[in-house]
Image (cartoon, rainbow, N blue to C red):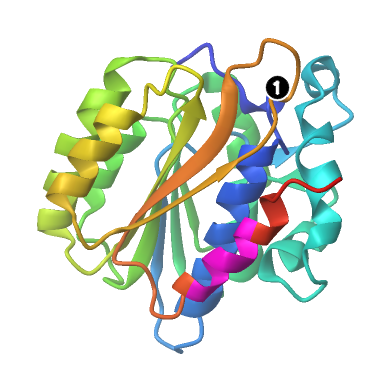
Amino acid sequence: MLSYQHIYHAGNAADVHKHALLATALEYLTQKPKPLSYIETHAGRGLYDLQAPEAAKTKEATQGIERLQNRFPADHPYIRALKAQLHYPGSPAIATALLRPQDTLHLAELHPKEYAALRHTMRAPNVHTYQQDGLALAQSLCPPTPRRGLMLVDPSYEVKDEYTALPRWLTAVTRKWNVGVVMIWYPILTSQAHAPMLAALTAAHPDALVHEVRFPPARDGHRMIGSGLFVVNPPYGLKPDLAFLDTVFETRT
């Protein structure tokens, strides 16, 4: 959606959930020396200044990274990726911090302003950026070269048909790329708008991993009360890390 800019939400609790599990998955995948592909369908600008006026307006990072960062050990891959950047890293910067020169990154962003920032920020030789619809790009790239790899699907969900389109899209992608790790993020809203989509995804991919966390609204009237990730072909060994993430988001007095 061309009106959406993630700077208003960067570093919120959903980002912490999403980026921490992404970092852990990439850590597992890079334990083997073979190269891999990383595909991102909704990349944003890559890096976010949490002191920028847009971020200061919503203050969502206050209830996210600022509240939760100290609950991670210093050697967690998410914390290592944070320390490698001057500003808060979006998922493209998380990936570039943890991946290797032999790995290939494909980053799609449709918003002109966000894409310009992404292209300026992500300039490593193994990074390819695209100003186009990310779901269509992913379809065209699959199966990627190298064939091993991970795809992050992170829509804004401000377009309602994204909920209904994603299950059909995922089925098409996994038919072409049956070995790829595909992570789909979704917001948990007070309306429970994600529930039919999650039911359809689970019915089509019963072996996928589902992980959800809950957290307080970032501000009065905010409708997001949790974050979910649906992971097809999760890396071996990832499940135990979910219990740790549960402790990060548990309510503490």
Query: Residue 210: horizontal and vertical position, in percent?
Result: 38, 53
> Which portion, as a residue range, is magenta?
240-246
Q: Quadrant of the C terminus?
A: top right
- Residue at the front extreme, as displayed: 253
What is the three-letter code of the residue carrying label 1? Tyr
Residue drawn at x 69%, y 62% as measured from the top left: 78
Whether the magenta-drawn stretch holds residue 241 is answered as: yes
Q: Position of residue 9 (x, y in %)?
A: 68, 27
Side of 213 where 42 appears, left or right: left
Q: Residue at x 70, y 22 (%)?
A: 8
Residue 181 in view here: yes
Residue 49 visible (yes or no) = no
* Relative height, residue 103 to residue 81 (above, below): below
Please tell me in which quadrant of the rendered image residue 244 appears: bottom right
Question: Is 217 included in the stretch rendered in magenta?
Answer: no
Residue found at the very far bottom of the displayed protein: 33
Q: Which residue is mark 1?
A: 8
Neighbours of disc 1 within 10 Å: few (<14), some (14-19), many (20+): many
Residue 219 placement (x, y as % from top left): 76, 18
Compared to 220, does 231 lie above or below?
A: below
Q: Secondary structure at mark 1?
A: helix
Q: Residue at x 65, y 33 (%)?
A: 117
Where 38 falls versus 160 (above or below)? below
Q: Main secondary structure of the magenta part?
A: helix
Left or right: where 130 falls relative to 224: left
Q: Residue at x 31, y 72 (%)?
A: 146
